[in-house]
Image (cartoon, rainbow, N blue to C red):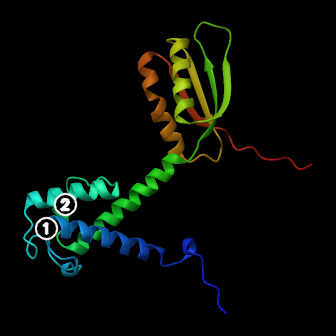
Amino acid sequence: MSRKEPAMFAPARDLNVHDELARCIHGLVAEHLGVGVADLAPEVSLVDDLAADSLDLVELALAIEQSLGVVLPRRFLDEVRTCGDLVGATLTLARLRKRATNRMDEPVALRARLTPAVAAWAVERVLVLTPYAAESLADDALRAGPGARLELRLAARATDGAVGRVREQFSRLAERGIEVRVRRDPARGRSAA
């Protein structure tokens, strides 16, 4: 008896997502343009075959955004001509959104050191940078006042994207006179024992 591969590892997973997305979009097109779902083949032109005008297309785009949680750029409607184009372009945007969301949700571990300009002390913390932790660090830096220095050191394995996100997250502190340094810890080799 052959064992069925779990769905999460199935090679045809993208086809299932594509089919589900196509059904959802075809339902929205049918609802907004007053046609049957059976009439919506990939090669059917939204404007020529279904007589959609610009207002219909805008309403359809808004419905897709609301239903699928994607943001459709302004040029989206200019590039989409057929039902197949609509499904393909929406799937591409959904994949890009998922990748971006996954990258943004990755926790960033770091060591933070805050040194005020005039005091002979420093506060050092090791933490995972959650929104609350970022807000607390920024508040502490603002309380330390102009001339303070906030050093944020990420693990050596941190990606360039993670370093860039952390830099961007604390960039507004420079406007308040706080020096922010974001860098990776140097890779440490293990000595043979």
Provide the secondary structure element on which disc 1 rests. Answer: helix
Give the answer, above or below, for where 24 lies relative to 67. below
Residue farthest to the right, as pictured: 193
In x, y percent, where is residue 151? 59, 26
**Based on the displayed image, in which of its 4 quarters is residue 112 positioned?**
top right
Q: Is residue 134 left or right of residue 83?
A: right
**Based on the displayed image, in which of its 4 quarters is residue 20 positioned?**
bottom left
In x, y percent, where is residue 159? 56, 48
Q: For residue 33, which numbered disc appears in the image?
A: 1
Give the answer, above or below, for where 50 lies relative to 3. above
Q: 123 or 42: nearer the eye?
A: 42
Give the mark toward the camera: 1 or 2.
1
**Based on the displayed image, in which of its 4 quarters is residue 153 positioned?**
top right
Residue farthest to the bottom, as pictured: 1
Residue type, numbered disc 1: Leu
Residue farthest to the top, as pictured: 118
Provide the secondary structure element on which disc 2 rests. Answer: helix
Estimate the spatial distance between the alpha carbons at disc 1 and disc 2, rounded to whole Å.
9 Å
Taking the spot 22% from the left edge, 76% from the top edge, the residue there is: 37
Taking the spot 55% from the left edge, 24% from the top edge, the residue there is: 136
> Considering only order in the chain, which callout, 2 or 1, is on the residue closer to the N terminus?
1
Residue type, numbered disc 2: Leu
Label 2: how many Cα within 10 Å (few below 14, some 14–19, many 20+): many
Taking the spot 45% from the left edge, 56% from the top edge, the residue there is: 99
Label 1: how many Cα within 10 Å (few below 14, some 14–19, many 20+): some
In x, y percent, where is residue 28? 23, 65
Give the residue number, with chain letter if any, for mark 2: 60
Q: Considering the image in quadrants, where does the N terminus appear?
A: bottom right
Q: 14 or 69: nearer the eye?
A: 69
Q: Is residue 161 left or right of residue 124?
A: left
Say if mark 1 contacts mark 2, CB within 8 Å.
Answer: yes
Taking the spot 58% from the left edge, 44% from the top edge, the residue there is: 107
